[in-house]
Image: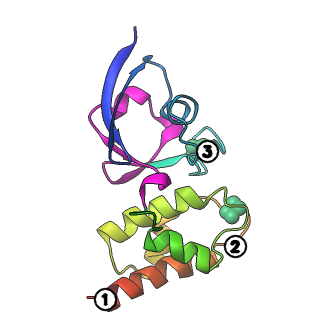
Amino acid sequence: MKKTIHFTLNGQKRSIDVAPTEILLEMLRERLGVKSPKCGCDRGDCGTCSVLVNGRTLRSCLMLAVEIDGAAVTTIEGLGKDGEMSPLQKTFHERNAFQCGFCAPGMILSATELLARNPEPTRDEVKEGLAGNLCRCTGYTPIIDAVLEVSRKSGEGK
Ligand code: FES
Ligand code: FES
């Protein structure tokens, strides 16, 4: 039997009827048209389906849609403000921290969570924070450099 769930998606209140077995990733992509979370592996290994749920990076391919009832869900579409990219989005772009871009939403969401809980991470802490996200193109160095640059610049602004 379907259940109506209520949650916020990128700051907007949403309600939708979901089946008990409906996967969050499919609901977001197929029913709500949110295309940034992608299905890379469908088994929790790659991180391309990552979304923030109440500020924590979780894999939407492994979650049931009913689990987000009452939660705040953020995808990369919700990170910028007033038409401006977030500092991480901007810096990834400036530093060419992605090539095909398939991993970028998951990487940026994981980095967003990391910097929210640890604004001045070491290089190793950045590596650890992004460890669940796979990238086939960049070799990771520009991604890690971009996260450290955002951390440094936000520290300078204090
Ligand atoms: S598609 Fe979810 S972790 Fe790979
Ligand atoms: S930029 Fe292609 S997978 Fe990361």
Asked if disc 3 and disc 1 are in contact, CB closer than 8 Å, the reply is no
Residue drawn at 42 percent across, 29 percent down: 65
Image x and y of residue 104, in percent? 59, 61
Residue drawn at 66 percent across, 45 percent down: 40
Is residue 77 among the parts visible in the rendering? yes
Q: Residues within 10 Å of mark 1 (few under 14, many from 20)?
A: few
Q: Residues within 10 Å of mark 3 (few under 14, many from 20)?
A: many
Three-letter code, disc 1: Gly
Q: Kindly identify which residue carries mark 2.
A: 139
Q: Is mark 3 within 8 Å of ligand 1?
A: yes
Image x and y of residue 152, in percent? 40, 87
Q: Kindly identify which residue carries mark 3.
A: 38
2 or 1: mark nearer the eye: 1
Magenta-drawn segment = 52-79
Q: Kindly identify which residue carries mark 1.
A: 157
Three-letter code, disc 2: Gly
Image x and y of residue 149, in percent? 48, 84
| For residue 16, side relative to residue 157 (left or right) | right
Image x and y of residue 157, in percent? 31, 88
Point out the quarter of the image occupied by ligand 1.
Answer: top right
